[in-house]
Amino acid sequence: MSDENVVTYEREGDLALIGLNRPDKRNAMSPELREQLLDAVLRAGDEAKCAILFGHGGNFCAGLDLARAAQTWNKDGGMRRLPFRYNRETELEAIARGRIPVIAALHGATLGGGFEMAAAAHIRVADETTFFGLPEGARGIFVGGGGSVRIARLIGFARMQDMMLTGRVLKPDEAERYGAVQYVVPKGESLAKARELAAAICKNAPLTNFAVTNSLPRLQDLSYDDGIYFERMVAEYTRSPESIDRVNQFLDKSAPRMSMPD
């Protein structure tokens, strides 16, 4: 497959569907895929209320395209001769701190950079075929997509260190138990579950969704007192005429109530 169209994009009402489309390479991350993914995520933020990120074929994403990376590294002997350029405008930052919530629908290989990509999403749904790994130690490299921050915060520093040092692979039930995913579903059903969750998310007030995806993660970096202060500021910011309408809908019993799950 050529790298001309390696990310698909579809709109379904308020929902954007973003698909990694290098199935013959297990959706490994090439420069073209990363560039197109950034464009798709930014587009979704402009025109949708929620996005689902998924992989075409049998896998979500097997991580870095090592063949492409080796071509670049071989040119300079593997040595970086100039200081690297820190860039916050990456595709994973656009997912993690963009304008709308992103759900990752996972299946098959979710490895290395693929695990980092999933960790950048706000909700992760894994089907029973999903497996998680961080093979960087065996490859002589290190995570580079924010995984040392985001994955470590999901599963804990010690578990991430174990996975990187020993090559340990997590099954879906382990990933759920350790906090890497929020939902585990039968084979082939992760995208359907993601659609169900997205439908609920799209009904929320967009300003509250933004506060949840952008303010809540930042609050975790603050001290207790600063966190309480910042929380109050965000609470005031998110209150709007829509808030009044939604509260009134609750009071006149036209809005659904929470109840015990089936």
Image: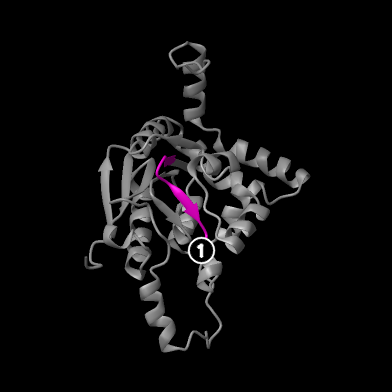
Residue 4 percent location from the top left of the image: 23, 66
Residue situated in front as seen by the camera: 208 or 186: 186
Identified by mark 1, the residue type is Pro
Q: Would you place residue 23 above or below residue 171 in this image?
A: below
Q: With 229 as the anchor, is 68 left or right in this view?
A: left
Residue plotted at (37% across, 81% down): 71
- Quadrant of the rendering where the N terminus is positioned: bottom left
Residue plotted at (34% across, 59% down): 27
Residue situated in front as seen by the camera: 155 or 94: 155
**Is 59 included in the stretch rendered in magenta?**
no
- Any part of residue 18 in sight: yes
Residue 174 percent location from the top left of the image: 55, 42
Residue situated in front as seen by the camera: 195 or 131: 131
Question: Which residue is identified by label 1?
Answer: 135
Q: Quadrant of residue 200?
A: top left
Residue situated in front as seen by the camera: 125 or 107: 107
Q: Would you place residue 222 above or below residue 241 in this image?
A: below
Residue 57 percent location from the top left of the image: 28, 51
**Neighbour class for label 1 at 10 Å: few (<14), some, many (≥20)?**
many
Q: Would you place residue 157 above or below residue 246 in this image?
A: below
Residue 213 percent location from the top left of the image: 52, 44
Residue plotted at (42% across, 46% down): 130
Q: Would you place residue 94 above or below residue 139 in this image?
A: above
Q: With 224 as the anchor, is 220 left or right in this view?
A: left
Where does the magenta region start and end?
A: 126-134
Element type at mark 1 = loop
Q: With 141 as the anchor, is 127 left or right in this view?
A: left
